[in-house]
Image (cartoon, rainbow, N blue to C red):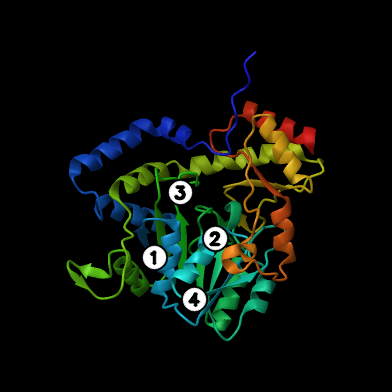
Amino acid sequence: MSQPKRIPIADPAAEYLELAGEIDAAVKGVLASGRYILGPEGTALEAEIARHVGAPHAVGVNSGTDALHLALRAAGIGPGDEVVMPSFTFVATAEAAAYAGAKPVFADIEAASFCLDPDSLERAITKRTRAVIAVHLYGRCAAMDRIADICRKKSLVLVEDCAQSLGASHGDLRAGAWGDFGCFSFYPTKNLAAAGDAGLVTARDAGHAETLRMLRHHGSRETYRHEILGYNSRLDEIQAAILRIKLRHLERFNEARARIARRYREALAGAPLTLPEDSREGRHVWHQFTIRSRKRDAMRAALDAAGIASMIYYPLPVHRQPLYGAGALPLPVTDAAAAEVLSLPIFPHLDEARQRRVCQAVLACA
């Protein structure tokens, strides 16, 4: 008897197969045009994302990491400055500050949301603090009303790391519309996914947007005239064309993720697990469905044996990384989360039969 097919943590190919006709036509259009960089597809995507987010400006770049780095550069963050951020994030958040010459300073998270704790943020601010990066983790926004208020009172630049949260909201504003900058990744497993690396920055200020456009293009706004030290960080036309097609389906795909999350919460209710909460203050777009268990490692091994993929985001928080000295900062909520979190498969094409398999396996080893 054949074994059931392995259930992946994400399935980018399923999105392509559903949208192949639209995507193939868009890619062929770009190839036939001869415009492969800084062309009409990128310009149109920027306008569409800006409208979707509710931000005045948007600038495409070549990755989510560059989005964070160039946002800090556009804000004038540099050597001697400190940037406060949660430690419970992918290392790129801290790398961006280091690339700008600044020092990343780590704060703790809220246990329920896995996002930056405003109280811990306030304690981490010093006279050298110039900016704050609030990470919207797993598809849920951080407490942006409080965080934005702290930044206003302290005259700090507010950068949103929206890599996992396009379409999420807190209060009346979407992720990317609260801060001075919103930084998005379109890595192939994101809710809005390219077929490679791609990113984008939203900006509130027109001057910041103009600086971002220069930074991504070798410090230039006029051919062969270079005004500032820039980078090669342009979003190519093929990726922009693919993203424009997928953006038309993003709401439908995010709604599918929400249905899957509801089914998980119903099926796993009462199990000896901590289930993720929906957002009471806005919209959760469920980039990940992340449970907590003190038996996490054994559970992951059991799921793997049952042919079910899972992931730990993140087993070693940034303040514990060798790169940052594996310091013993007092971030107890972060350390506890890193020891217990496990993300289950969630993607728009995860059907109910496969989800039942996941739930049965989780319940069997919970």
Q: Is residue 361 above or below residue 174?
A: above
SS class, disc 4? loop
Mark 1 and mark 2 lie on one chain; the one further toward the N terminus is: 1
- Position of residue 68 in the picture relative to residue 332 (left or right): left
Q: Which residue is mark 4?
A: 102
Q: Is residue 230 above or below residue 129?
A: above
Mark 3 and mark 2 lie on one chain; the one further toward the N terminus is: 2
Q: Which residue is mark 2?
A: 91
| Residue 177, horizontal then vertical, whole percent | 48, 64
Q: Are marks 4 and 2 in contact (CB under 8 Å)?
A: no
Residue at left offset 62%, top offset 44%: 311
Query: What's under tag 4, amino acid-wise?
Result: Ala
Q: Which residue is mark 1?
A: 56
Query: What's under tag 1, amino acid-wise?
Result: Pro
Q: Which of label 3 and label 4 is nearer to you?
A: 4
Depth check: give the residue in front, 287 or 198: 198
| Residue 182, horizontal then vertical, whole percent | 47, 63
Categorize mark 4 by other alpha carbons within 10 Å: few (<14), some (14-19), many (20+): many
Query: What's under tag 2, amino acid-wise?
Result: Val
Residue 206, located in which quarter of the rendered image? bottom left
Residue 7: mark in rendering: none
Q: Which residue is mark 3?
A: 187
